[in-house]
Image: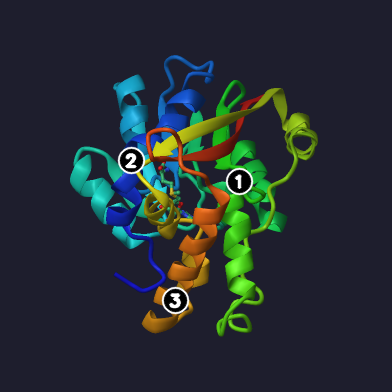
Amino acid sequence: MATNDWSAQQYLKFEAERTRPSRDLLAQIPLKSPKRVVDLGCGPGNSTAVLLSQYPDAQLTGIDSSPDMIRKASATLPNIKFTVEDLNTYAPQEPVDIFFSNAVFQWIPRSKRLEVVKRLMQSQPSGGVFAFQVPDNLAEPSHVAMQETAADGPWAETLSTVGRDTFQSPQEIYDELKPLCSDVNIWHTHYYHSLEDHEAVVEWVKSTGLRPYIGPLSPVDSNSFLKSYLGRLEKLYPKTIDGRVLLRYPRLFVVAVRA
Ligand SMILES: C[S@@+](CC[C@H](N)C(=O)[O-])C[C@H]1O[C@@H](n2cnc3c(N)ncnc32)[C@H](O)[C@@H]1O
């Protein structure tokens, strides 16, 4: 696996929690019998499995830029076609009724992400659906603590430009997509995940939000970074009555229907 590749194994440590929003997103899609469905940024195939159970008769495919994720997805769902593709350049060969994307578009740079959505939407038939969900957690203590840890250590200069772009506001999304759509349905959900301890919070973000921070560091610095980050989390998240940690996780959902 390339060092900048995603790790399917690490990602799947919290499979149930990470997959739940894909079910909540799917529940709001008005199309009942789509012909073609594409899971954009399908990861290890967990969101694709949710789509397969809802649309067993559709022609379902998954794309992802990570070879490790695509390997895992293909091994888990051998009857589905998965391909390594970058969303920035991906173009379907035939019209797609449902584009579905769970927890992916936050990784596309802010200036490009809605352009990608609109470009793909333009290829959809009238009544087609573009549904996506993204974490909206950059202001959460777990993510603020990443920035603070990055700015406070021997790695500060190396990590000075690291950080994820904020996501567009609901109105910005609505205003961009509505000219192409008959309906744009947007909502937020706050999940509260009860995790075993603070180390579990680190394990959770290690395969996602922390990747850009620990990726550029040497193994020694990466260990010190994680220790310092853990110390911050221990102060920010008091233990619950049963000795666990409640991780608040806001997520933003969009279901847009092509006019
Ligand atoms: C948080 S995982 C989501 C996986 C899965 N959809 C789920 O529901 O859990 C994000 C996925 O987006 C993929 N990804 C990130 N940037 C991408 C891009 N530009 N093109 C395609 N996939 C991308 C990553 O490789 C990763 O598998």
Residue denoted by label 1: 137
Residue sitting at x 25%, y 55%: 71
Q: Specify the amino acid type for callout 2.
A: Glu
Residue 259 visible in the current orientation: no
**Among numbered discs 2 and 3, the one appearing first in the sequence:** 2
Q: Is residue 163 above or below residue 142?
A: below
Mark toward the viewer: 1 or 3: 3
State the mark number for residue 117.
none
Helix, strand or loop status at disc 1? loop
Residue sitting at x 35%, y 51%: 11
Residue denoted by label 2: 15
Instruction: Using the rendered view, name the quadrant where residue 119 is placed.
Output: top right
Asked if ligand 1 lies within 8 A of label 2, the reply is yes
Residue denoted by label 3: 224
**Among numbered discs 1 and 2, the one appearing first in the sequence:** 2
Q: CA distance from mark 1 to mark 3?
A: 24 Å
Horizontal side of 107 relative to 63 (left or right) equals right
Q: Are marks 2 and 3 in contact (CB under 8 Å)?
A: no
Q: Specify the amino acid type for callout 3.
A: Ser
Give the camera-side residue of 185 and 145: 145
Mark toward the viewer: 2 or 3: 3
Residue 22: x percent and y percent?
A: 45, 31
Q: Quadrant of the C terminus?
A: top right
Residue 152: x percent and y percent?
A: 62, 76
